[in-house]
Image (cartoon, rainbow, N blue to C red):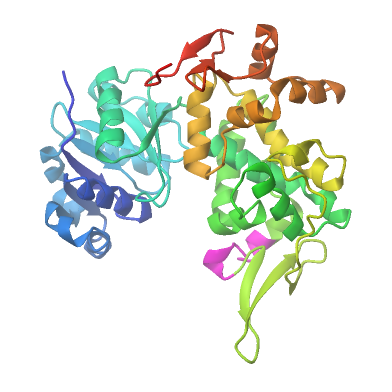
Amino acid sequence: MTRSIQSVAVIGAGTMGAGIAAASAAAGCRVLILDMNIETAEAALQQVDEDARHLVTAGTVDADLAAVSGYDWVCEAIVEDLSIKRDLFSRLEEVRKDGSVISSNTSGIPLRQISEGMTQRFCSDVAITHFFNPVRVMRLFELVPGDDTDPEVISAFAQFGADRLGKGVVHAKDTVNFIGNRIGCFFMLSGLHLAKPFLAEGMNQETIDSVLAAPVGLPPTGLYGLIDLIGLDVMELVGKNLAVNLPEADLGHQYTNFPPTEQRMHDDGQLGRKAGGGFYRQTKSPDGERLKESFDLLDESWRPAEVPSLGGIPAELGEVIFQDSLEGELAWQVFGGTLRYAAGLIPEIADDVVNVDNAIRWGFNWVHGPFEMLDHLGPQRVIARIRSEGDQVPSMLEVLDRAGTDSFYRNEGTEYLGADGDYHAIEGSTS
């Protein structure tokens, strides 16, 4: 059966559901958006471009669920609760049409848990279609099949995501947090722990954020600023999900809980931008001047923001990692640690380095994906440092070393090093 997506039913009109609906309507699709209450669904309708609004119908789950029978793709974007999702999918199975495709926009629940005990039709037609927020802006579209998903379903989603929505499609595996959030959240959660000794050494958090930004090819939010943007409440839920679903030997287990200070911030409602402040906040002086303040993580009080101290950091991208300084050690442990973590996740989370690099560039706006960055730094140089410190070389760096090469990409980026130690053509590339 050839699958084609021309119409989209979105169940859940929150931030993600509204974004998926708006993007689909902008692509010229007929769209149905349902929520538990009509006010939320109608509010989502207002996010649709005015010239595409005629394509969208809003309704409620209780009154209008049967209407999904007229749509090619049924996308679930409701609360991250497994039992609630499974109940909804059971109801959707009774009304969706044969030949339709169905998906969840979950950011971390494995598809195998959603599919367990479901009908063969469901298991054949379902995938995870994970967008990043805001949907209209972020390019990343992670596509995750289940063990029984029909390849035609994945082809239909991939074609729709790339050709109709203009997204960068990444093929991930059914593992916790998929690709982007598995690596991106490791950077954040490990960073909260690994940065502590540098604070104790006198490095302020503004400097930590500045080191973990442009010098290593990351956005200007750095570490603490990025978590402020996402929210400590979201990160705590991510940590709990990782604690339950990470493989037993995964390095991420040691970072799934917050350090004590960050946990107190969370418990006090100091969650980030959404709560008026987290690690940073904007205030006004009595005369109306806008002031930026930082939450000192040592004495747990607010203070005026300080100027980062970046004197002497090499201008060359990434070279700070090899600098003999506090800043260099910070970059090596936090950012370098994330590169090493990523290098140990193939083929667990993806079949190849290309999907990992695309996911991190498109989802977290890194200048280079992890393996592209390792190529920039010189993988053999990184391997030598890992060995000099008595640590285990991650699997893909071992593959590279055994292959006797010093790059994950070659032939002007048209070939990549596979887990089998051979180079393979990148789909769509021409040499």
The answer to whether residue 383 is seen in the rendering is yes
Q: Is residue 205 above or below residue 378?
A: below
Q: Quadrant of the C terminus?
A: top left
Q: Quadrant of the N terminus?
A: top left
Residue reaching furthest to the bottom: 287
240 left or right of 31?
right
Q: Residue at x 27, y 48 (%)?
A: 23
244 left or right of 190?
left
Could you say which is closer to the camera, residue 197 or residue 379? 379
Could you say which is closer to the camera, residue 15 or residue 265? 15
Q: Residue at x 33, y 46 (%)?
A: 77
| Residue 339 in the image, given as x and y percentages of width and height | 66, 32
| Residue 12 in the image, given as x and y percentages of width and height | 30, 51
Q: Is residue 59 above or below residue 256?
A: below
Q: Residue at x 18, y 49 (%)?
A: 32
| Residue 198 in the image, given as x and y percentages of width and height | 83, 50
In which image quadrant can residue 300 be found? bottom right
Q: Is residue 362 above or below residue 121?
A: below
Instruction: Report the span colored magenta.
Output: 265-276
Indicate whether residue 268 is drawn in magenta.
yes
Count of labels shown? 0
The answer to whether residue 178 is seen in the rendering is no
| Residue 227 in the image, given as x and y percentages of width and height | 60, 54
Could you say which is closer to the camera, residue 206 or residue 312? 312
224 left or right of 113?
right
Indicate whether residue 11 is drawn in magenta.
no
Q: Is residue 284 above or below residue 20?
A: below
Q: Residue at x 65, y 86 (%)?
A: 285
